[in-house]
Image (spheres, grey):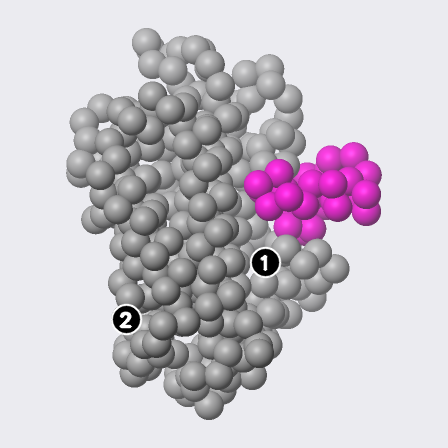
Amino acid sequence: MLSRTASDLYWMSRYLERAENLARMLDVSYSLSLMPQDGRGDGLDELAMPLLITGTLDDYLERHGPLHAERMLHFFALDAQNSASIYSCLGAARSNAHAVRGRITADMWENINATWLEIRGIADQGLGRYGISRFCEWVKERSHLFRGATFGTIMRGEAYRFIRLGTFIERADNTLRLLDARYEMLGEDIDEIDGRPARSYYQWSALLRALSSFEAFAEIYRGSPGTRKVSELLLLRPEVPRSLRACMDELYLMLSSLPGDNGRPAQRLAAELDARLRYTSIDEVLDEGLHAWLTDFILRVRELGQAIHTSYLEVA
């Protein structure tokens, strides 16, 4: 497969996954911003969290000045001038899909093209009229439909593998960043209601819901979510679809099934990271320090993304 084609397939799926992850991030931040803040402000810190995670807070402040709820929501969701907005991600995914129409199925193209046309209509209508929660659910629904069309209609060849690589490298990065951001925000919170750290409980529950892992947590663990249990679930449990371990398992599987010797550096790094997760315990993670461990793994996932780019996606 030509590097250009592989790159378009990879980035098509990566941008779609990013749009879904941004919607999940926005949904949980908006929900938490509506809760009583216990003297911590008016919820703007929660709304600013997605901007901090995506590194776009400075851009927002430069363009729009002080934090303002309505402006932040528009900037993150529908601002065409913000390259990291959900709108821009879906536009980029559609452009990549258009470039490789001959390598994806009609169902996949029709889904992604319809998604782009619909979000343009939503942008014209405005987020205030359409509804923030409704918008986030719409983004997730469109992503699920595309993933279903992909899984149900495309041949299990190289195109499928590059689509999966884009999805799971993006998902791994998102899981790491969301967990790190929530952990850092909680700090040493000891506010309690009925003997439980109330703010901590709602923060961890919101994170689990954002990653569609709340039901999995309830099935695997007893009691309320906390740092240890949530971290183990989202980092080391292979049966949880959005866990880091599940992402690395899939990345290693896809890379090891690609032909040729060009990808050996990426395959070697994926194998190393996959083995690290297989044989690491949550005690070792916490002993190292959760923030330090997450920061290091974010860098390693970035290295893997660069290795994939160098091995397969660079145009000679």
Q: Position of residue 204 (x, y in %)?
A: 39, 30
Question: Badge 1: few (under 14), some or many (20 or more) residues near its Cα, within 10 Å?
Answer: many
Alpha carbon distance from label 1 to label 2: 32 Å
Three-letter amino acid code at the position of disc 2: Ser
- Does 308 sit left or right of 89 as displayed? left
Q: Residue at x 33, y 32 (%)?
A: 231
Extreme-bottom residue of the structure: 102
Q: Residue at x 61, y 70 (%)?
A: 91
Q: Tell me whether the residue at label 1 lies in contact with that at label 2, contact meaning CB atoms closer than 8 angstroms.
A: no
67 in magenta: yes
First to last magenta residue range: 50-76
Q: Is residue 37 above or below residue 20?
A: above
Identify which amino acid the numbered label 1 is placed on.
Ile
Q: Secondary structure at mark 2?
A: loop
Q: Mark 2 highlights which residue?
A: 257
Quarter of the N terminus within the rendering: bottom left
Q: Position of residue 96 (x, y in %)?
A: 55, 76
Q: Is residue 226 above or below residue 176?
A: above
Residue at 53%, 38% in the rendered image = 29
Mark sitting on residue 86:
1
Report crowding for label 2: few under 14, some 14 to 19, many 20 or more residues within 10 A (C-alpha): few
Relative to residue 134, is residue 218 drawn left or right? left
